Amino acid sequence: MSHYHQLLNQLEELNLTNMKGNLPAYLDEVVKSEKTLVDSLFELTQLELRFRKNETQKRILKRAMFPYHKRLHDFDFDFQPKIKKAEIKDLMTLRFLDTHDNILFIGNSGVGKTHLAVSIGMECIDKGLSCLFITSTELVNRLSRAHKRGTSETMLKKYAGYSVLIIDEVGYLPFSKEGSNLLFQLINMRYERKSTIITTNIPLSQWAEIFGNKKLTNALLDRLVHHSKIIQITGPSYRMKKYSETKPS
Ligand SMILES: Nc1ncnc2c1ncn2[C@@H]1O[C@H](COP(=O)(O)OP(=O)(O)OP(=O)(O)O)[C@@H](O)[C@H]1O
Ligand SMILES: [Mg+2]
């Protein structure tokens, strides 16, 4: 086997697959004296590093479990004029994390609650912070299953550890007594330590119906709202946008 082919194998063995792929093109340039060996090696390693960083970022994004990857620049503020753009832009600076503030997005279906929560979550990932997106139903199911196995404490600690936890769709389904208690414990553990982002279509005044316990709901809301930014979104559903555009006036 020629040294060239052995080199390809060695690059593979060293896990430098991107460099291996780019090598032939660079060798062509070196042969044509269009690039020096040093410049080629510099660029090849630079491309490899960029590729690895990208792959790591993709893995981290996948682990955050966002339902979709959308940014603030994908959000049409003109469609939802009641949202204060400056307020959302301020949230994107992530300064709310310094004071462990929570964010509550409240509004009807399709107004952009999850989109905005995801945008903030993705910004957190960009900045190297740990973030997890989970629906409240899935979170409570996981905690309840762990509770039955006697491992809820470990699981609570895991969810309490994320710099940002996005709990989506609070109130779409009511919680069991055990589920409500576990969720309360988690919010209590995160209180004044980490930021939690909540999306809900139920006004806070009606939360007792979801949790089935007035005292617990008050204590939970007290902790959530104490240091928080509440973004109330009133407006049309973006999901109905196409329908309203084609509707005869
Ligand atoms: N103002 C907007 N500009 C662009 N896309 C939007 C806007 N509002 C919502 N969308 C898009 O519409 C869809 C629904 O929005 P989103 O998921 O944020 O709804 P939601 O408020 O969380 O509703 P639900 O309570 O039903 O979960 C998503 O694909 C989202 O990206
Ligand atoms: Mg949603």
Image (tube, grey):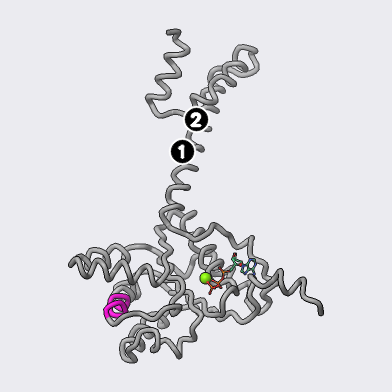
Name the residue at the right extreme.
249
> Where's the N terminus, which quadrant?
top left
Residue that badge 1 annotates: 52
Residue 237 visible in the picture: yes
Q: Circle 1 sits in a helix, a strand or a loop, which is it?
A: helix
Residue at 64% in and 65% down: 75
Give percent across and percent down for residue 237.
Answer: 63, 75
> Where's the C terminus, which quadrant?
bottom right
Give percent across and percent down for residue 35.
Answer: 61, 19
Residue at 32% in and 69% down: 141
Amino acid type of the residue that numbered disc 1 sits on in the rendered structure: Arg
Span highlighted in magenta in the image: 178-184
Is 150 displayed left or right of 205 in the figure? Answer: left
Question: For residue 163, what is the image quadrant?
Answer: bottom left
Residue at 37% in and 69% down: 194
Magenta stretch: residue 183 in it?
yes
Q: Are marks 2 and 1 in contact (CB under 8 Å)?
A: yes
Give percent across and percent down for residue 33.
Answer: 63, 13
Is 76 located above or below residue 228 in the figure?
Answer: above
